[in-house]
């Protein structure tokens, strides 16, 4: 009888905690911090590997390369700073080749 009473009280406490959790939205916050965050990260990864994103970055790299070759020394340093920020999360080794890859790599590092 005593064990049954403890089991019923434990079950009631559990139901009360779950109810409070739903009532105050803690579950939604947890869901947002885990599942929604993972979905957004996956969408960002897919976007960064899309043809349009990579082609846009490639075109930007070509534009910066041409501008850099025409620039003065002070302008070159400014362009290097812009390029290092613009291509910070872009994997030039994977998507660029030759002189363009070397140029972006040198500007970043």
Image: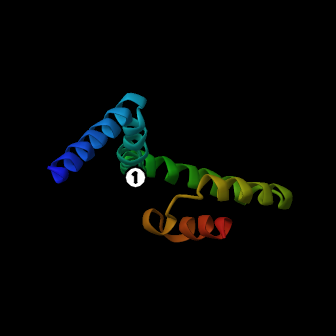
Please state if 19 lies on the left or on the right of 101 as rendered: left
Residue 65, located in which quarter of the rendered image?
bottom right
Question: Which residue: 38% across, 53% down?
Answer: 49
Front residue (pair 109, 75): 109
Q: Secondary structure at mark 1?
A: helix
Front residue (pair 33, 62): 33
Residue 106, located in which quarter of the rendered image?
bottom right
Question: Which residue: 20% across, 43% down?
Answer: 8
* Percent x, y of residue 13: 31, 41
* Percent x, y of residue 17: 35, 39
Question: Which residue: 18% across, 53% down?
Answer: 3
- Residue extending furthest toward the front: 1
Please state if 73 lies on the left or on the right of 10 as rendered: right
Front residue (pair 67, 80): 80
Report how many numbered discs are placed on residues in the image: 1
- The residue labelled by disc 1 is 45
Image quarter (top left, top right, bottom left or bottom right) of the C terminus: bottom right
Q: How many neighbours does mark 1 have within 10 angstroms: few (below 14), some (14-19), or many (20 or more)?
A: few
């Amino acid at each position: 009888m005593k064990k049954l009473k403890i089991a019923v009280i434990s079950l009631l406490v559990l139901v009360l905690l779950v109810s409070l959790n739903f009532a105050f939205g803690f579950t939604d916050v947890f869901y947002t911090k885990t599942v929604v965050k993972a979905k957004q990260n996956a969408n960002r990864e897919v976007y960064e590997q899309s043809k349009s994103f990579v082609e846009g970055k490639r075109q930007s790299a070509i534009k910066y390369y041409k501008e850099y070759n025409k620039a003065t020394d002070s302008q070159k340093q400014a362009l290097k700073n812009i390029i290092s920020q613009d291509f910070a999360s872009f994997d030039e080794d994977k998507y660029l080749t030759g002189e363009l890859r070397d140029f972006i790599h040198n500007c970043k590092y």
